[in-house]
Amino acid sequence: MNLHIHSSKDALAEAFAAYIAQQVQKKESYSIALSGGSTPKVLFQKLASDYKTLDWSKVKLFWGDERMVPPDHDESNFKMTKDFLLDHIDIPAENVFRVMGENEEEEEVKRYEEVLKANLPQQNGLPQFDLVILGMGEDGHTASIFPHQMELLTVDQICALATHPESGQKRVTLTGVMINNGAEVAFLVTGVGKAEKVAAIVNKEGIATFYPAAHIHPKEGQLNWWLDDSAALNIKH
Ligand code: 6PG
């Protein structure tokens, strides 16, 4: 587990964007599963403003999870990514593999699984991302694996249908097995509201076992935590 701690959200986004661009430049093609929510917005803005000349035709974009809403819905992770990144870079439409939130839920789980199988190389019998970017909720959830559905960490599936614990909103999520098959997993977490659970996970405290994010350990790949000072506040150095 490597920690990358930066003084502010902006400095963190700058460093992580530079890292991603460096990784893309090293490879012929580079597949990324994007996280949703609000944290990635500053990263996407940095990529959109400072990396327009990156060869985006080498990049394939997927999502680690998506709310089952239409792509133009304000809660759509695809819409957020389109607004903050896709509309500002020259990436071929065929390189963008969104979860179709407008589809019937169970059918979309199956369809998206086939998309992953058809567009990613296999490793350990599963499709493998070059990079999985994850956020973490204040309850310790990651992707759309919430504490009340810990079975989604280990279920023998590539994707699953999840339910938000408060709103009941349905979501398609990568499973923990699929996330942990990533060549690299990067948590991008900011803000003091996350500090307690980040510390519990990084400091390997017993309570962390109840947090889905604590169960993300890439089988063979690297695990990186990209944090601002606020989120890293309680980590024991
Ligand atoms: C989603 C995300 C989810 C998110 C965390 C953190 O669809 O909401 O993928 O896992 O990363 O909830 O969200 P914030 O970045 O908004 O705190």
Image (cartoon, grey):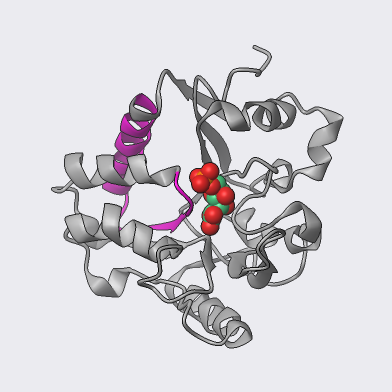
Residue at 52%, 78% (x, y): give it: 112
Numbered range of the magenta stretch: 11-38
User: Percent from the top left, x then y, of residue 195?
Assistant: 63, 26
Q: Quadrant of the C terminus?
A: top right
Image quadrant where residue 88 sits: bottom left
x, y percentage for residue 150?
Answer: 79, 57
Q: Horizontal placement of 193 versus 140: left or right?
A: left
Considering every residue shown, the one lying at the far top of the view is 237
Relative to 172, 49 lies left or right: left
Location of residue 89 in the rendering, given as x and y in whole percent from the top left corner = 19, 56
The quarter of the picture where residue 143 lies is: bottom right
* Image-based side of 68 in relation to 92, left or right: right
> In this orientation, which residue lies closer to the viewer: 13 or 138?
138
Left-right relation of 125 to 16: right
Residue shown at the point (50%, 28%) measured from the top left: 227
Where's residue 32, x and y in %?
42, 56
Number of marks drawn: 0
Q: Answer whether residue 25 is magenta in the image.
A: yes
Residue at (69, 43) in percent of width and height: 140
In depth, the one of 166 and 44 nearer the eye is 166
Q: Quadrant of the N terminus?
A: top right
Query: Would you say residue 41 is visible in this rendering?
Result: yes
Residue closest to the eye, 16 or 141? 141
